[in-house]
Image (cartoon, grey):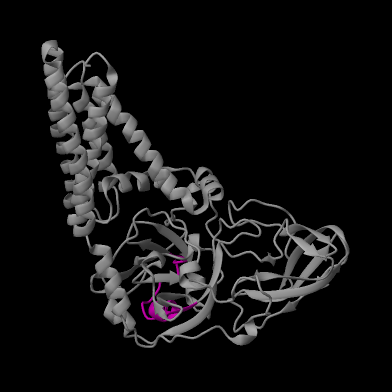
Amino acid sequence: MTTHRPPWALAGVLAGLAGLATSYAAAMVLTIRESPVVAVAELVIRLTPGAVAERAISVLGHLDKPALVVGIVVLLLGCFAGAGVLARRSWWLPITVWAALAGLGLVAVLTQRGADPVDALPVVVGLMTWITVHSALTDALRREQRRPDLESRERRVFVMVAGVVAVASLGIAVAGRFVGAGRRHVEVSRRLLRIPGVTRRQAPAATSVGLPGVAPWQTPNEDFYLIDTTIAKPTIEPEDWSLRIHGLVERELELTYSELVARPKTESWITLACVSNEVGGGLVGNARWSGVRLATLLSGLGISEEADCVLQTSHDGWTCATPLEVLTDERDAMLAVAMNGRPLPIEHGFPVRTVVPGLYGYVSATKWVVDLEVTTFAKAVGYWTTKGWSAEGPVKIASRIDVPRSGDDVEAGPVSIGGVAWHQHTGIAAVEVQVDGGPWQRAELGTVPSVDTWVQWALTVDLPEGDHEVRVRAVGRDGDTQTGVVRDPAPDGATGLHTIEISASQS
């Protein structure tokens, strides 16, 4: 038995999984936001070049982070098995593997924003578990190696210990999940919140063009796109949240959650779009946001004439640099506390996030925001700008065909075509549709309450039997017509015309 690698590799894998289970449980019990594995995943995200990250998002979509975690776990399993095999040669060789893995976890945990010594405890717990459990599992294998005549008994001992370790690891992980009720408690707090000045309104009826298949003008919270760099979303009790506004100002300002929500509110329908959105993509949504205007907060602080941006920082350490001008003009740039009439979902930044009409989220939309530093672009660098994205990210004019879908078969004759178009803080003046390279035809537009939202559009065209190519373009209220030049999302947003291919046939 002991001359073969599998039992030794199995011992390493079981010890490794036991260490992951105890470190996870410790993180949950201590209500630490991230287990070491999650911290390593987020370290990888921070160090990943922008082009690689963009490619992963485009290929994997919302599965990019789960795929990263799975990949890390697979690599860990390989390391665990390797540590087990090394134990055949010497008792100390696997310890070097465990120590190296713990060192990586420690670096990942302690480089997180706001980390303190307590955050290292799950790593220490995991390391001690690795060494102790691995020693217990390999003792039987070593005794058998020294006394082949005891093989049968030692095999039984190994199997028994391995079974106990496997069951105990699962139990510890499950127990840790139940004991660590931080997110559940925050979710309860969120549901019980009643924020003064926040109203719940349905989308105005005239915003819809009445064409089934077109994206709802008001995006439900649960359907709103999610893009961020976190694996474990920060869970912050409202009473624990605070915001500091400082930097190139005469007077600093610190706000608690209760102080913020006591201020007068603004409520606006605002469409947000991700810079990673491909032409015709779905990383865009429209909601009613409620919060406190940033222009009001900043106006009384005595901002230096030198300042031209605000460096925003999230609770998890993510940063972006936003032009000061867009935070202090007439638009409803705000510290948002509610989305569609309800306190922000945790995934969308509860308890407070920033919302800025007209800018891509990578330079404006900070979830779980806790710090605003008034500064200059020469000194402030945001997370994505370090990875090659543009320092300023005004949203480009765009349009999309929602119905019919590319590849659909439709009945020849009158065919209804529709979708959405947006150019936040500029507005859409017209949407035009072209069929098979023919003349551009004006579509009917839904009405909108402001220039900060997208607009639904629809047009009925007569399609003869056969294959057809349909494309759409938008015209902004500033006269800007959407370009047909195809460019990738990097470094400041995709361009091109959304085009579909459909077939018309007689019924």
**What residue is drawn where x is 54% and y is 61%?**
274
Q: Residue at x 64, y 70 (%)?
A: 422
> Residue 442 sits in which quadrant?
bottom right
> Where, by quadrant of the figure, is residue 405 drawn?
bottom right
- Above or below: residue 63 compared with residue 310: above
Q: Residue at x 83, y 63 (%)?
A: 435
Q: Is residue 151 above or below residue 51?
A: above
Q: Is residue 51 left or right of residue 91?
A: right
Query: Above or below — where is 417 with respect to 208?
Result: above
Locate the N terminus and report the quarter of the image it occupies: top left
In the rendered image, residue 89 lying in the magenta stretch gets the answer: no
Asked whether the viewer can see residue 197, the reply is yes
Indicate left or right for 160 with 312 as reference. left
Residue 300 lies in the magenta-colored region: yes
Left or right of residue 345: residue 2: left
Please tell me whether residue 17 is drawn above or below residue 283 in the rendered image.
above
Residues drawn in magenta: 288-310
For the C terminus, which image quadrant?
bottom right
Q: Position of residue 497 (x, y in %)?
A: 73, 59
Residue nearest the viewer, comparing 156 with 501: 156
Residue 185 location (% of width, % of height): 24, 69
